[in-house]
């Protein structure tokens, strides 16, 4: 039997299994077909002859490896795309604008109600005190500290939106 006939036989015998495995791994119909066809094209072009006993294992392993390469390539492409988008997104803020934002932030902290919100913000962000330590100092639960912090951050966001949009 010629190599081409042997390859046709293998194609008919293993195509469905190979395609199914590729589809499971890639979740993409077109890419799955491409992977399987690439493997058979490689076998045909490089005149690779397979033993009947090991042909199925070889073909399925080839599908798995090609699919892993495709997935790896996708992930690398997505990382590069994300980095590129991050690079485009970086904007230079003039120093004057930063100073305005800091002044607005400090003013917002001074205006926080109730005053315990201001104390928690200062202790945690300026002094680096943990939530557990703040709770212990205040004689309240950590949950209470989180609630005050959430309220403080919400107030600060609102204050900064009002101040910086003018």
Image (cartoon, rainbow, N blue to C red):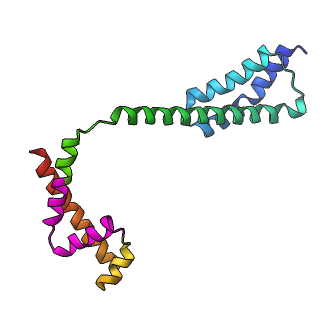
Q: Quadrant of the N terminus?
A: top right
At a point 38% along the width and 72% down the height, the residue shown is 130
Q: Is residue 77 left or right of residue 121?
A: right
Q: Look at the image and say whether residue 116 sits in the magenta stretch.
A: yes
Work out whether residue 165 or residue 4 is closer to the camera in this orientation and state it: 165
Q: x%, y% of residue 131?
A: 36, 73
Counting from the top left corner in percent of width and height, residue 101 is at: 19, 50
Based on the displayed image, in which of its 4 quarters is residue 119 positioned? bottom left
Instruction: Give the residue at the far left of this rendering.
Output: 166
- Which residue is depicted at the point 61% across and 30% down? 32
Q: Please say if 118 is above or below 154.
A: below
- Magenta segment boundaries in residue numbering: 103-128
Which of the 4 quarters of the picture holds residue 65? top right
Q: Is residue 70 left or right of residue 157?
A: right
| Number of residue marks | 0
Q: Is residue 120 above or below residue 141?
A: above
Give percent across and percent down for residue 137. 32, 83
Q: Is residue 3 covered in magenta?
A: no
Work out which quarter of the rendered image holds the C terminus and state it: top left
Q: Nearer the viewer, residue 166 or 48?
A: 166
Q: Indicate whether 116 appears above or below 52.
A: below
Left or right side of 27 for 127:
left
Query: Could you tell me which residue is drawn at 50 percent across and 36 percent down?
Result: 79
Magenta segment, prevailing SS (helix, strand or loop): helix
Where is residue 61, by image quadrant?
top right
Q: Residue at x 37, y 78 (%)?
A: 133
Question: Left or right: where does residue 57 sit relative to residue 24?
Answer: right
Q: Residue 21 location, x and y as percent? A: 67, 37
Position above or below: 13 against 43: below
């Amino acid at each position: 039997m010629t190599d081409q006939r042997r390859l046709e036989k293998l194609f008919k015998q293993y195509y469905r299994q190979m395609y199914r495995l590729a589809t499971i791994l890639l979740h993409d119909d077109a890419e799955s077909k491409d992977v399987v066809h690439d493997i058979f094209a490689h076998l045909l072009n490089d005149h690779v002859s397979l033993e009947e006993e090991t042909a199925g294992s070889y073909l399925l392993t080839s599908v798995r490896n090609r699919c892993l390469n495709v997935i790896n390539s996708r992930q690398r492409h997505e990382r590069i795309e994300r980095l590129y988008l991050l690079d485009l997104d970086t904007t230079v803020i003039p120093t004057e604008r930063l100073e305005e934002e800091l002044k607005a932030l400090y003013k917002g902290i001074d205006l926080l109600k109730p005053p315990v919100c201001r104390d928690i913000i200062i202790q945690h962000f300026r002094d680096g005190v943990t939530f557990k330590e703040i709770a212990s100092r205040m004689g309240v639960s950590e949950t209470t500290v989180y609630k005050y912090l959430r309220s403080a951050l919400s107030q600060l966001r609102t204050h900064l939106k009002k101040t910086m949009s003018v």
